[in-house]
Image (cartoon, rainbow, N blue to C red):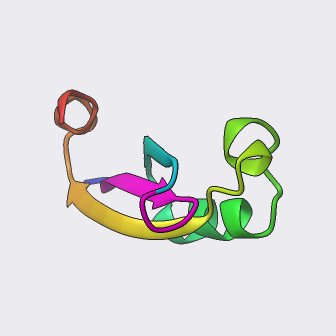
C-alpha cells in the first residue's frame, strides 16, 4: 500500500501557508527548500515544514 502525505509549509511564523499532498514527503520538502519548484512557494519563500500527516488512501488525503 502506498503512503500519501498531507503537508503544510510556511514562509515564517505567522506568514503565508501552503497545503498540499504528495507520495514522497522528503523529496517535496527538499524541492521546496532548494527552490526547485517554481511558482507560489518559491515566490513567497514558503519552505518550512510545519505539519504533516500520513494516509494510505489518496482520496481521504485529498478530503482531509
Taking the image as shown, residue 3 lies to the left or right of residue 60, namely right
Q: Is residue 19 magenta?
A: no
* Number of callouts: 0
Location of residue 35 in the rendering, given as x and y in whole percent from the top left corner: 81, 60
17 or 14, which is in the foreground? 14
Q: Residue at x 71, y 57 (%)?
A: 45
Taking the image as shown, residue 50 lies to the left or right of residue 56, namely right
Q: Residue at x 83, y 56 (%)?
A: 36
Q: In the rendered image, which quarter is residue 59 located in?
A: top left
Q: Is residue 12 magenta?
A: yes
Check the image and name the residue furthest to the front. 14
Q: Residue at x 54, y 66 (%)?
A: 12
Residue range in magenta is: 3-14
| Residue 26 to residue 19: above or below | below
Quarter of the image where the C terminus is located: top left
Q: In the rendered image, which quarter is residue 63 located in?
A: top left
Location of residue 44 in the rendering, given as x and y in whole percent from the top left corner: 71, 48
Q: Residue at x 28, y 31 (%)?
A: 62
Taking the image as shown, residue 42 lies to the left or right of residue 13, namely right
Location of residue 56 in the rendering, given as x and y in whole percent from the top left corner: 20, 50
| Residue 41 to residue 25: above or below | above
| Residue 33 to residue 28: above or below | below
Quarter of the image where the N terminus is located: bottom left
Amino acid at each position: 500500500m502506498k503512503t500519501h502525505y498531507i503537508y503544510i509549509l510556511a514562509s515564517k511564523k505567522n506568514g503565508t501557508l501552503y497545503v498540499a499532498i504528495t507520495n514522497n514527503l522528503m523529496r517535496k520538502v527538499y524541492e521546496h527548500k532548494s527552490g526547485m519548484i517554481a511558482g507560489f512557494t518559491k515566490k513567497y519563500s514558503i519552505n518550512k515544514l510545519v505539519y504533516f500527516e500520513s494516509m494510505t488512501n489518496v482520496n481521504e488525503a485529498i478530503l482531509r
